[in-house]
Structure formats: C-alpha cells, structure tokens
Amino acid sequence: MLYLVPTPIGNLKDITFRAVEILKEVEVVLCEDTRVSGKLLKHFGIETRTFSFHAHNEHSQLEKWINVLKEGQNIAQISDAGTPGLSDPGFLLVRACYENDIKVSCLPGPNAAIPALVMSGFPCDRFYFEGFLPQKKGRQTRLKYLAKMDCTIVLYESPHRIVKCLNQIKEHLGDHKQVAVCRELTKLHEEVLRGPIQNVIDELASRNSIKGEIVLVIN
Ligand code: SAM
C-alpha cells in the first residue's frame, strides 16, 4: 500500500492522529527532503526509515520503490509541507501504483489551497486550482486561460513575485477583480489581505519587504 500523508504547513498541531500512526507503521517514508521531514518525524517520535524522493530523482527511483511495494512493504510519501502531489512530488508514484495494481490511499490533512479558498470569503462552491504559474515561458498563455474562468481561482505564488503577479492578473483579468492574498497560513503572522486588486497591490507595494508563503485567491 502507498499512503500519501499530508504534513503541517506551519503549525505542527495540524498533523492528524492517523498521519502519525501511518508514519509509524509503514516500513519506509519517502520524503522530499529528509532533513526537513526528519525534524517533523523526530517531533512525533517516528523512527521509520526515510529516503529522499523529490522532483530530481523521482523518475530514476520510481521502479525501485514500485518493486519494494510489490514485495509487500508499505510506503508513506510525504512532502516538505502539505499534501504530497499538490504542487509537490506525488503524482508519478501514484500513477505507477495503479499501473502495477498497488493500492493507494491519500489521507485528508493539511494543504494551503483549501484553507485559503475558504478564508478568502469568495464563493467556494466551484473553484479552479492553478498551482504555480510558469515563471517565464507559458505564463502569458496561462493568464489568458485564467481570464476565461467563471469561478474562484486559487494559485500559489512566491513573496518576491506577488506584486508583479497581481499586476499581471489585473492586466489580463481586469481591474474590477477582488483578490485575497493569504499569507503565512497557520503560522504566528497569518494574515489575509482582501479587497479590490489595486488596493491589495498598493498595500503590498507600501511594505519594505514581503516575506512568507502566499496563496492568492481571485474572485
Ligand atoms: N503541497 C503543498 C500543499 O499541500 O499546499 C504545497 C507545496 S508548494 C511547493 C508550496 C507553496 O504552497 C508555497 O509557495 C505557497 O504558495 C503555498 N503554501 C505553503 N504553505 C503555506 C502557508 N503556510 N501559507 C500560505 N501559503 C502556503
């Protein structure tokens, strides 16, 4: 069995009882970064062996882990934070499991997108998850695509690019748009900047520096 196990996005108390239980029970934990996850596992007294499995080795290591699963061992995959597979490694191993008749289970748990969507106060009956926009090539194409959406949009953006990104959104989607910049979710300095896009741009541009992790929600 392959378990996809969500881990906290900032507040360690957000791990679930079942996540701890599964991480203790499995034979192997595949981590995006063993040093990052090592701290988390230590905090919860989890002594399961860890191996690195990330964007740069997931293709070359795929067969090895599929064979381990076929031998009957249970594996949990985790990422640095949040739900594996969501703008993080996960999809390749899941697909390979189905191709090899190996059972897959994803535990519900922490992720940045859904709390941001709900906190935004914009309609969340239908939404589109963009993840990260491409940084250069293909960015314009994605922005044009987003301009046609008729539902709430959720995307991940870095603090260095957020103002530039908001200006591009304004250009492509219109200056009537309302946005919510959800920053440092579940952490001490959690905040939501919400309102007409130009007001949010002005507020962010007036700050000396913008730090932390950000989810951008567009109404
Ligand atoms: N797998 C993760 C998830 O389930 O949400 C996402 C991983 S992606 C590599 C990292 C991005 O998620 C960050 O750049 C940011 O956009 C968003 N993110 C992660 N933690 C966050 C937090 N505490 N507050 C706001 N955004 C966060």
Image: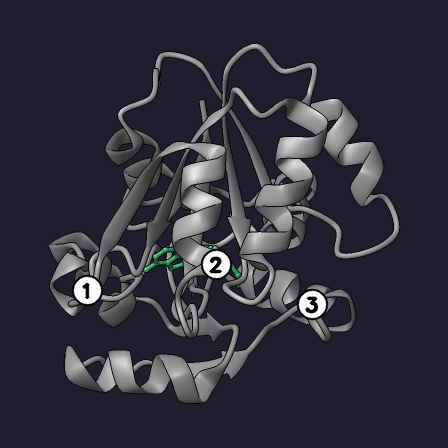
Q: Residues within 10 Å of mark 2 (few under 14, many from 20)?
A: some
Residue 21: image x %, image y %?
18, 62
Query: Is residue 203 found left or right of 134 in the rendered image?
Result: left
Query: Is residue 142 found left or right of 130 in the rendered image?
Result: right
Of the two numbered discs 1 and 2 in the rendering, the one whose residue sits closer to the viewer: 2
Query: Above or below — where is 139 with respect to 20?
Result: above
Count every numbered label the image shows and give the total.
3
What kind of residue is marked 2?
A: Ala
Frontmost residue, 196 versus 135: 196
Residue drawn at x 44%, y 35% is 217
Residue position for label 3: 58
Which quarter of the picture shows residue 118?
top left
What kind of residue is marked 1?
A: Val
> What secondary structure is marked by label 2?
helix
Distance, label 1 to label 2, CA atoms, is: 41 Å
Query: Is residue 5 found left or right of 168 in the rendered image?
Result: left
Residue 167: image x %, image y %?
63, 43
Frontmost residue, 84 versus 131: 131
Distance, label 1 to label 3, CA atoms, is: 24 Å
Disc with the residue nearer the chain's start (1 vs 3)? 1
Residue position for label 2: 205
Residue drawn at x 15%, y 77% is 44
Residue position for label 1: 20
> What secondary structure is marked by label 3?
helix
Frontmost residue, 151 versus 175: 175
